[in-house]
Image: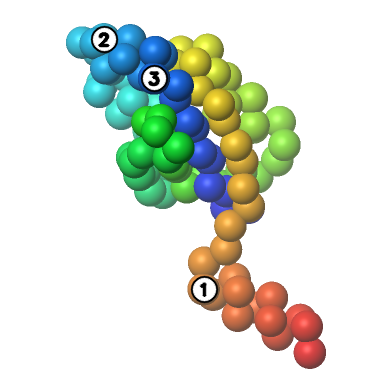
Amino acid sequence: MRFLVRAQIPTEAGNKMIKNPRFLQELENYIHKVKAEAAYFFEASGDRTFAFIVNIESADMIPSIAEPLFQDIGAKVEFHPVMVFEDLKKAVEHLS
């Protein structure tokens, strides 16, 4: 199932993260490890925020996706199931 994984990084942790000379390489490694379909970077509520689209086939995959964000960058992490338009069309067909 496709999920949007949102990681919100508080300012102090984000400042430390940005000063790490390996930050971009570590972030790229993470994106490849979780096999993100897409990655977005933006501000939300005044914090640096990352959003990744990942496929999670079973609940036991969640810790391997979340823990690096919790432990390595001090992020608040949320998981939201999402659909592409084709999924929505299928869902609406089942409503009839």
| Residue 61 at x, y percent in the picture | 64, 32
> How are the residues colored?
rainbow
Q: Of circles 3 and 1, which is in front?
A: 3
Residue at screen point 50% across, 23% down: 75
- The secondary structure type at the circle numbered 3 is helix
Residue designated by label 3? 11
Q: Of circles 1 and 2, which is in front?
A: 2
**Numbered marks: total:** 3
Is 17 on the left or on the right of 69, as rendered? left
Q: Is residue 68 visible?
A: no
Foreground of the two, 20 or 28:
20
Within 10 Å of the Cα at label 1, are there few (<14), some (14-19), or many (20+) other Cα atoms? few
- The secondary structure type at the circle numbered 1 is helix
Rounded to the nearest whole Å, what is the CA distance between mark 3 and mark 2? 14 Å
Residue designated by label 1? 85
Circle 1/circle 2 CB separation < 8 Å: no
Rounded to the nearest whole Å, what is the CA distance between mark 3 and mark 1? 35 Å
Rounded to the nearest whole Å, what is the CA distance between mark 1 and mark 2? 38 Å
Furthest residue toward front: 46
Residue designated by label 2? 20
Residue at screen point 24% across, 11% down: 19
Which amino acid type corresponds to the residue marked 2 in the rendered image?
Asn
